[in-house]
Amino acid sequence: MQNRAHLDLGANAVFLAQGGDIAMSQLRFTSDSTVGSSVISTTALLNGILNRTGSVGAYNATLPTAAQVLAAAPNLSVGDSWSFILRNTVAFAATMVAATGMELGADTAIVASAVREYLLTVLGAGPGATLIARTNTNTQLTNVAAVDIARVSVGQGVTGTGVAANTVIIGLDANQGIIYLNNATTATADNIAITTNPRIAVNGVRSSPL
């Protein structure tokens, strides 16, 4: 469904956008002149445009963690998305590298002297937590304290001994002390340390020469 944007003109004057109305872009320009690989700051990622100069060879552009991004933008929630544009102004390719909770999709590499646009989408919000649970060779973590269940949320990623890769929380039952997972654990054991983390998908949208 397509909806008209609301334009806030100040002094409590809010109108539905009409043809010809112009809404200000929230994009901001950030620069990075590091020689070699570097970490993209949360500020650059949220500002929306990163102008990359300085490198004299192929380099890595490492994303911040999903937890860092959501800490810097606490109003983001599951389903929210935004655009990020990387301007690779050097004559060498760049490789996007994921940090914890950042999930790279298709078309994320950047060729030399090119611009690539990405769409980032929040898959699991909340800061994440470390807790103790029992694994049961099924899709349930049991014996979880209610206070710990309150610290996690559906959509967060899960790691720990016996937890399969790409495991995600799909349900919570505070009364029974159960966390439901999309993947079965591979062992039965008590007092297993479990870590959860927020998740953000990163997908390439399009690329063009400078």
Image: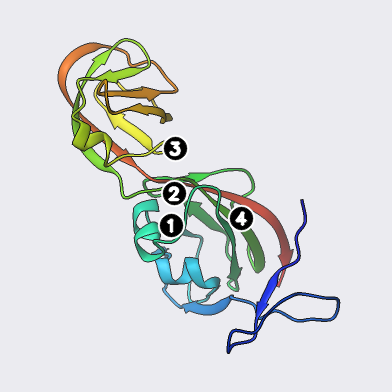
Q: Nearer the viewer, residue 197 or 203?
A: 197
Give the residue number, with chain letter if any, for mark 3. Answer: 155
Query: Of circles 3 and 4, which is in front?
Result: 3
Give the residue number, with chain letter if any, for mark 2. Answer: 98
Residue 111 in the image, given as x and y percentages of width and height? 64, 59
Amino acid type, callout 4: Leu
Residue at image position (27%, 39%) is: 150
Query: Of circles 4 and 2, which is in front?
Result: 4
Task: Label 2: state its secondary structure.
Answer: loop
**Could you say which quadrant of the image residue 174 lies in?**
top left
Q: Earlier in the sequence, mark 2 or mark 3?
A: 2
Q: Is residue 158 visible?
A: yes
Q: Nearer the viewer, residue 164 or 171?
A: 171
Residue 160 falls left or right of residue 2: left
Mark 4–mark 2 Cα distance, whole angstroms, equals 14 Å
Amino acid type, callout 3: Gly
Query: Of circles 1 and 4, which is in front?
Result: 4
Mark 1–mark 4 Cα distance, whole angstroms, equals 13 Å
Q: Residue furthest right?
A: 19
Q: Quadrant of the C terminus?
A: bottom right
Task: Label 4: state its secondary structure.
Answer: strand
Residue at image position (31%, 10%) is: 137
Mark 1–mark 2 Cα distance, whole angstroms, equals 5 Å
Residue at image position (42%, 57%) is: 62
Q: Residue furthest left?
A: 191
Give the residue number, with chain letter if any, for mark 4. Answer: 119
Q: Earlier in the sequence, mark 1 or mark 2?
A: 1
Give the residue number, with chain letter if any, for mark 1. Answer: 63
Q: Are marks 1 and 2 in contact (CB under 8 Å)?
A: yes
Q: Are marks 1 and 4 in contact (CB under 8 Å)?
A: no
Mark 1–mark 3 Cα distance, whole angstroms, equals 20 Å
Q: Is residue 111 visible?
A: no
